[in-house]
Image (cartoon, helix red, strand yellow):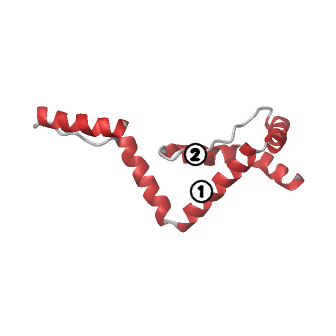
Amino acid sequence: MFVLNFTFYRRQMRRQYPSKIFLPCMAHQMNLIFGEIFKEQALYQRISKEAVRLVSYFNKSVFFTGNLRDEQIRLYKKHVCLVSPGDTRWNSYYFCFYSILKTQAALKVNIIQH
């Protein structure tokens, strides 16, 4: 709905101010660019799918999430949330990968133990 309203208003603004240039949303453009990069590179596709699968696995299981949290507290003295990426936010994949890297040692211990 927001996109339809944005398109409508942008069209109206172009008519009202024909001498002005109206650029598309930069965040949306970046999302499209990153999406295309991930579609073109098989390695990136595989890594992103594995990252999402790993995060989903831990986020769906109270048992494994608890074990991971306990291991994080033991190793890092704090809890690190695993972040699931969103479909329309290009930086959500960054935060997903970053959350996995931040708790990499605790993840390895959990995978080895269970």
Q: x and y percent of residue 74 in the render?
A: 85, 37
Image quadrant in which the N terminus is located: top left
| Residue 12, quarter of picture | top left
| Residue 18, quarter of picture | top left
Q: Residue 48 carries which label?
A: 1
Q: Which amino acid does label 2 sit on?
A: Pro
User: Decide: marks 1, 2 in contact (CB < 8 A)?
Assistant: yes
Residue 108 falls left or right of residue 24: right
Residue at image coords 72%, 37%:
80
Q: What element carries label 2?
A: loop
N-terminal of the pair, mark 1 or mark 2, is 1
Residue at image coords 57%, 65%:
43
Kindly report the distance in space between the C-alpha atoms of the residues bearing marks 1 and 2. Answer: 9 Å
Residue at image coords 43%, 48%:
31
| Residue 24, quarter of picture | top left
Residue at image coords 12%, 36%:
15
